[in-house]
Image: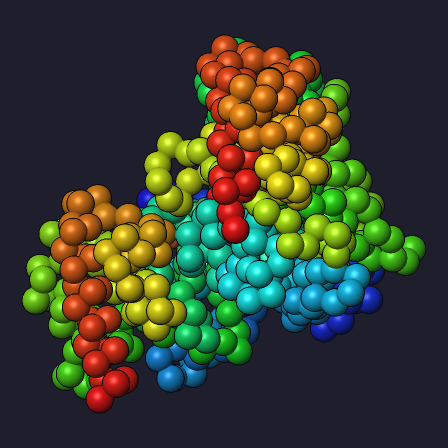
């Protein structure tokens, strides 16, 4: 592990002054929240910051539900949010995505902010023994393009990077139109979650729109996403404690036997949490006939590109959407 | 083993940064340590306090052998920096028995023969204690899901699940009685 100075500021203004930046391997100052991803990255020398700034005790960890919707403080843990009664009742998609993530221990430690900013599980990114990784070392190439890419993305990829964004929570949240509240030296701003992560394009080392020093202070979910019938379907290589091969977050409003409106997002297949507005439009007004659902889900294949080992995801993700819509529709 | 910092490596990395004074509360006792900021809670327990009950299987959060309780909640000690655990109440396998009297889950692990090599066992027991107190030990299926963060290379899972079920029954009959 590279030596670092550990900063433990007492308040948020002292934090912001240190200029840390998440999601960039060349940032010399970086935050640590729950540490469940950061400590791994430090142990494996993937991240080598000179200074590590602890966010412990300086960020809001509250969970509030009001007329505006849901507000999750950035320091709330995965376990706290998953077990929160009002979240379970009104935003079950969020609780379900969290309970299908990681392990009970990790969920006790990991925070909302850290979850959204966790780094990709691409094995080449996480192993400094491989030289070619544009995300880790800009301009070095991408070992995954012609390598073991069964876990990699088929949506939003570029010839410079095909890494999946691994968060389950982010997939559920992006389906529910969530935003993140940011605070930086220049003040506060709110960014739709769908705009927080950048596409890799030819700059995969720039993962987010965060400015130096900026922190996530909270996640907000609008009230109109409450009470929808929903399901988070996670397909993985073992039954529990594993990242998604493909996941589908679906929330629908029904009217008799028809879908009035649908929200659909996918995980495990995109370079960022991936919302599918074309599938949503096709589902609006549809009934639950399997053929109808399959036709709508087929639109998810638009713009996909497989790279060899991961081609199977293109079919699998369509089936996952159909199954998730069926399960959501069958809920009381 | 992956994750450990050998002194030679630390030196090669350009000399450690200044040590930090860290005070850790473990099993009810306060310990004052001077630690490199890179020290994980697991390394502090094992290398500095010689509490070697918590094991290092992977050092990367994947196996659960290092599970301890922090303010009553199960966490992976290998993913915590020791300096950030200051002020928290930490309980390790060494603090579970009351004198010579084993914790009910320790007793049921022996009763059920819930281990072979024993390497995962202290982590399994600490996670199992939390699994029971959280109320996630209602059925074998629920126990399997909520114990999925603890791997056993020897495959003693059936016996581990049975041991947790037994101890959960003891603790619920105590509560009712
Ligand atoms: C064994 C294991 C299995 C896992 N399985 C899954 C899974 O199935 N699904 C899943 O979704 N995730 C999974 N994870 C990932 C886990 O969810 C993340 O590690 C965790 O959510 C990160 O949160 P943290 O608070 O520990 O972040 P940290 O590790 O502390 O930080 C992560 C990053 O976020 C930055 N950061 C943290 N908070 C803020 C903030 N408020 N503002 C700005 N920057 C910030 C840090 O600088 C760092 O770059 C798994 C992790 C492990 C160890
Ligand atoms: S897919 Fe991205 S993260 Fe993985 S090796 Fe290629 S550039 Fe690196
Ligand atoms: S040593 Fe901590 S999880 Fe393996
Ligand atoms: S008893 Fe050997 S690893 Fe579990």
Q: Is residue A244 visible?
A: no
Q: Residue furthest right?
A: A186
Q: Residue furthest bottom?
A: B177
Q: Residue furthest front?
A: A256
Q: Is residue A306 visible?
A: yes
- Is residue A104 rendered to the left or right of residue B84? left
Quadrant in which the N terminus of chain B is drawn: top left
Toward the viewer: B21 or A202? Answer: A202
User: In the displayed structure, would residue A281 be above or below residue B29?
Assistant: above
Q: Position of residue A25 (x, y in %)?
A: 67, 37
- Is residue A275 rendered to the left or right of residue B18? right
- Is residue A10 rendered to the left or right of residue A126? right
Q: Residue at x 61, y 13 (%)?
A: A305
Quadrant in which the C terminus of chain B is drawn: bottom left
Toward the viewer: A228 or A157? Answer: A228
Q: Residue at x 53, y 78 (%)?
A: B87
- Is residue B159 rendered to the left or right of residue B140? left
Q: Position of residue A172 (x, y in %)?
A: 61, 44
Q: Residue at x 62, y 41 (%)?
A: A256
Toward the viewer: B98 or A222? Answer: A222
Toward the viewer: B58 or A61? Answer: A61
Q: Residue at x 65, y 28 (%)?
A: A286
Q: Position of residue A160 (x, y in %)?
A: 67, 18
Displayed quadrant of residue B168: bottom left
Q: Position of residue B149 (x, y in %)?
A: 36, 52
Displayed quadrant of residue B84: bottom right
């Amino acid at each position: 592990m590279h030596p670092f100075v550990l900063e433990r500021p007492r308040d948020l203004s002292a934090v912001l002054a240190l200029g840390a930046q998440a999601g960039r391997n060349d940032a010399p100052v970086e935050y640590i929240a729950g540490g469940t991803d950061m400590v791994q990255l430090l142990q494996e020398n993937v991240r080598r910051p000179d200074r590590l700034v602890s966010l412990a005790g300086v960020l809001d960890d509250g969970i509030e539900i009001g007329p505006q919707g849901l507000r999750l403080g950035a320091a709330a843990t995965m376990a706290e949010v998953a077990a929160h009664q009002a979240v379970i009742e009104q935003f079950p998609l969020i609780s379900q995505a969290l309970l299908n993530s990681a392990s009970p221990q990790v969920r006790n430690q990991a925070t909302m902010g850290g979850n959204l900013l966790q780094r990709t599980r691409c094995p080449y990114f996480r192993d400094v023994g491989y030289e070619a990784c544009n995300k880790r070392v800009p301009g070095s190439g991408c070992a995954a393009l012609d390598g073991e890419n069964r876990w990699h993305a088929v949506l939003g990829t570029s010839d410079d990077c095909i890494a999946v964004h691994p968060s389950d929570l982010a997939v559920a949240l992006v389906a529910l139109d969530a935003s993140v509240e940011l605070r930086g030296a220049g003040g506060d701003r709110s960014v739709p979650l769908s705009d927080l992560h950048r596409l890799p394009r030819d700059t995969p080392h720039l993962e987010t729109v965060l400015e130096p020093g900026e922190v996530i202070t909270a996640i907000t979910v609008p009230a109109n996403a409450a009470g929808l019938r929903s399901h988070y379907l996670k397909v993985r290589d073992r039954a529990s404690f594993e990242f998604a091969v493909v996941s589908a977050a679906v929330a629908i409003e029904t009217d008799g036997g028809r879908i009035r409106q649908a929200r659909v997002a996918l995980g495990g297949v995109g370079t960022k949490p991936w919302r599918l507005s074309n599938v949503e439009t096709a589902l609006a007004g549809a009934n639950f006939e399997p053929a109808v659902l399959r036709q709508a889900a087929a639109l998810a294949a638009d713009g996909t590109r497989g790279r060899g080992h991961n081609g199977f995801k293109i079919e699998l993700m369509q089936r996952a959407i159909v199954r998730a819509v069926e399960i959501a529709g069958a809920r009381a | 083993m992956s994750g450990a910092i050998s002194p030679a490596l630390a030196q090669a990395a350009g000399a450690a940064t200044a040590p930090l004074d860290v005070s850790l509360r473990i099993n009810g006792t306060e310990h004052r340590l001077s630690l490199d900021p890179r020290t994980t809670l697991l390394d502090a327990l094992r290398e500095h306090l010689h509490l070697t009950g918590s094991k290092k299987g992977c050092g990367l959060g994947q196996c659960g052998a290092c599970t301890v309780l922090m303010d009553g909640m199960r966490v992976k000690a290998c993913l915590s920096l020791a300096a950030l655990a200051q002020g928290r109440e930490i309980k390790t396998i060494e603090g579970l028995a009351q004198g010579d009297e084993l914790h009910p889950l320790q007793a049921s692990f022996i009763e059920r023969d819930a281990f072979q090599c024993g390497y995962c066992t202290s982590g399994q027991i600490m996670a199992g204690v939390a699994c029971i107190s959280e109320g996630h030990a209602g059925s074998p299926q629920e126990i399997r899901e909520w114990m999925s963060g603890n791997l056993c290379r020897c495959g003693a899972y059936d016996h581990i699940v049975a041991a947790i079920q037994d101890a959960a029954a003891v603790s619920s009959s105590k509560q009712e009685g």
